[in-house]
Amino acid sequence: MAETKDIVEFEIGSGLYGMDISLVREIVEILPITRLPGSQNCIVGVINLRGEVTMIISINELLSIKEESEKKNGKIIVMVPDLTGGSNIGIIVGEVHSVLSIPVDDIEPVTGILATDSGGFVKGIIKTSSGDKERLEEAGKKSRLMLYLDIEKILTDLHLPCNIR
């Protein structure tokens, strides 16, 4: 049996992105965000998530993705604190679709100019139709490409604690 990775699939702007589900503690609705003066552009601020201060990052800022408009279904993906040096860190995304089990062989590594232009934040490209044709047809969607994000690189480049292995 082929090795698989469980990937949470979500939107940023009009693009489809994914990350390892093992890095995700929970997915919550957008909460009121307190801005942090003088912070990097991609650090939106902090939220109070059930009594825990959680730093919120805007991945679209990092990847230079323009949001067409505020999405009603926006979510915050909160990382597992053990993997972020004990810090509570969440990322803002658009709609979260599902968790997919993707064969490792279906993840195309990015190389050359694709790797350079993405800042190294994309570690692969996944064609979403390969094992999920029925789900896509039910939702009335066509095959799309999903960018598989390197969350470790993102956190490291932001100089945030990161213990992802």
Image (cartoon, rainbow, N blue to C red):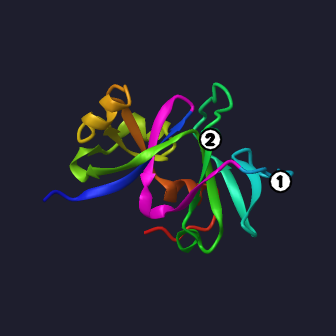
Kindly report which numbered mark, 1 or 2, lies closer to the viewer in this rendering.
2
> For residue 22: magenta?
yes
Picture residue at 58% right of the left edge, 71% below the top: 81
Give the image quarter of residue 1.
bottom left
> For residue 19: magenta?
yes
Q: Main secondary structure of the magenta part?
A: strand
Q: Which residue is mark 1?
A: 36
Picture residue at 41% right of the left edge, 36% below the top: 114
Which type of secondary structure does the marked residue at label 2 adopt?
Answer: loop
Quick one: 92 or 110, which is closer to the camera?
92
Picture residue at 44% right of the left edge, 52% below the top: 19
Task: Indicate the amino acid at tag 2.
Answer: Gly
- Residue 61 spot, x, y in % from top left: 65, 39
Disc on the earlier residue, 1 or 2: 1
Task: Indicate the amino acid at tag 1.
Answer: Leu
Picture residue at 63% right of the left edge, 29% below the top: 66
In-image side of 147 versus 82 (left or right): left
Q: Which residue is mark 2?
A: 74
C-alpha separation, residue under disc 1 versus residue under disc 2: 21 Å
